[in-house]
Image (cartoon, rainbow, N blue to C red):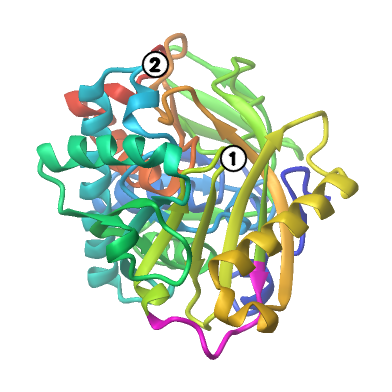
């Protein structure tokens, strides 16, 4: 049983035809070993092979069946919390920098799709943050002013200019500020292309021991096969116990529901991703086959991600929330998929990317927070530079020791 995922993940259930990779059955060597076969590892493989860096990726289970299988793949440049709140934990300058890096990552994602073809249901969208509470109108307007003053292409929405059928007191519409895709297909698309450029890909290959040497690393599989490499990259998502016991964030459980295909939905929902300003917040996107994904209602992690009573309560809350967002078709809404999974948040909403402070040949790409896929794009680019002894001062905001 997958300890990170429970329920019926949408993306792995609808995708029945995909590449299967062999398991490692002998000793091997490579320049860079990537451990983790989700979308983060796939993006790192993509950028390393693009930069002609020899690499191998190993996944302990099946490619794309861990936390990648439950991500909503709702991409946006902004963070989980608003700037006024984040200013407690980091500077306003760092927050704006992360926003701008997010915009760049969205553009870079579009470039990947343009170069490889769209085999993952990718679609660029607008992004919409809103509140339906009068008490939060000022907070949203302040967020709007910060973004507008730093050059973001946005529009302030209030009750009089509300284009949606759900209630809005204040909102920020970010033009081309988001994207959606199928993360399972995207992972396989990236790995297929990386393999064609020389990357070695193995699944069902569990690494259970790592020995760090002066100028190399040795990783051993559960069956005793040794992989010798110069560098090793941790792309294992929320389970990093093989590398460290340092708590890089706060563990939560997040919940998602996915509807059956809807015929009579508001067509503009296909052009936007939506997040409310609640705590815990909810987020909404459409799929290519006209389903609605609604997620959120995060709860603290307690020993196991699956508490059946809690999960059913959360699925019920999400269903009622969805009906309030789509009142004209609320009676037609049917839920086909319910799932929950482990999630890690950080105080400043940023992931952790860079070189380990103790083992010089160990690197991390931890896309924690709601922007994991965005951070993984940036991480793949940054690690490619670091492995060539280049730096990027902008990426200091993801420093492991902050």
Residue 137, x across and y down, in percent:
36, 41
Task: Answer yes or no: is residue 231 visible.
Answer: no
Nearer the viewer's eye, disc 2 or disc 1? 1
Question: Label 1: which residue?
Answer: 280
* Residue 33 covered by magenta stretch: no
Which one is in front, 275 or 118? 275
Precedes in sequence: disc 2 or disc 1: 2
Number of other residues with Cα within 10 Å of mark 1, as a class: few under 14, some 14 to 19, many 20 or more: few
Q: Main secondary structure of the magenta part?
A: loop
Residue 266 belongs to magenta span: yes
Q: Residue at x 60, y 65 (%)?
A: 324
Q: Quadrant of residue 174?
A: bottom left
At x 41%, y 12%, the residue is 401
The residue sitting at the bottom extreme is 263
Residue on which disc 2 sits: 89
Q: Which corner quadrant of the image does residue 210 belong to?
A: top right
Local packing at callout 2 (Cα closer than 10 Å; few below 14, some 14-19, many 20+) is few
Q: Is residue 44 left or right of residue 296?
A: left
Secondary structure category for the residue under label 2: loop
Q: Is residue 263 above or below residue 223?
A: below
Q: Is residue 78 above or below residue 193?
A: above
The residues bearing labels 2 and 1 have C-alpha atoms spaced at a distance of 19 Å
In the picture, the quarter occupied by the C terminus is top left
- Determine the residue located farthest toward the top in the rendered image: 358
- Magenta stretch bounds: 258-267
């Amino acid at each position: 049983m997958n300890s990170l995922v429970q329920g019926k993940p949408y993306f792995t259930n609808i995708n029945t035809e995909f590449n299967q990779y062999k398991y490692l059955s002998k000793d091997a060597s490579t320049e860079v070993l990537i451990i983790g076969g989700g979308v983060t590892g796939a993006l790192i493989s993509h950028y390393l092979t693009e930069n002609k860096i020899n690499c191998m990726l190993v996944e302990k289970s099946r490619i794309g069946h861990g936390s990648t299988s439950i991500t909503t793949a709702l991409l946006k440049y902004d963070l989980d919390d608003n700037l006024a709140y984040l200013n407690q934990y980091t500077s306003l300058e760092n927050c704006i920098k992360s926003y701008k890096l997010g915009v760049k990552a969205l553009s870079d994602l579009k470039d990947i799709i343009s170069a490889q073809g769209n085999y993952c249901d990718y679609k660029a969208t607008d992004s919409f943050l809103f509140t339906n509470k009068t008490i939060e109108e000022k907070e949203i307007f302040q967020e709007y002013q910060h973004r507008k003053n730093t050059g973001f292409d946005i529009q302030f929405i209030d009750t009089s200019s509300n284009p949606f059928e759900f209630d809005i007191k204040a909102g920020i519409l970010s033009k081309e500020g988001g994207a959606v895709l199928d993360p399972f297909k995207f992972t396989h698309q990236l790995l297929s292309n990386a393999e064609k450029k020389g990357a070695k890909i193995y699944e069902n290959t569990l690494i259970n021991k790592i020995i760090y040497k002066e100028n190399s690393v040795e990783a051993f599989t559960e069956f005793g096969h040794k992989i010798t490499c110069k560098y090793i990259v941790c792309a294992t998502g929320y389970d990093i116990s093989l590398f460290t016991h340092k708590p890089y964030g706060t563990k939560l459980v997040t919940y998602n529901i996915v509807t059956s295909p809807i015929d009579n939905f508001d067509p503009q929902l296909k052009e936007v991703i939506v997040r409310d300003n609640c705590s815990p917040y909810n987020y909404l996107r459409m799929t290519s086959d006209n389903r609605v994904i609604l997620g959120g209602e995060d709860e603290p992690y307690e020993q196991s991600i699956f508490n059946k009573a809690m999960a059913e309560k959360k699925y019920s809350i999400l269903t009622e929330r969805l009906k309030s967002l789509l009142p004209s078709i609320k009676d037609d809404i049917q839920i086909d998929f319910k799932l929950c999974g482990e999630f890690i948040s950080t105080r400043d909403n940023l992931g952790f990317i860079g070189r380990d402070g103790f083992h010089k040949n160990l690197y991390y790409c931890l896309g924690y927070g709601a922007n994991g896929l965005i951070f993984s794009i940036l991480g793949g680019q940054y690690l490619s530079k670091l492995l060539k002894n280049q730096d990027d001062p902008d990426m200091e905001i993801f420093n492991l020791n902050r």
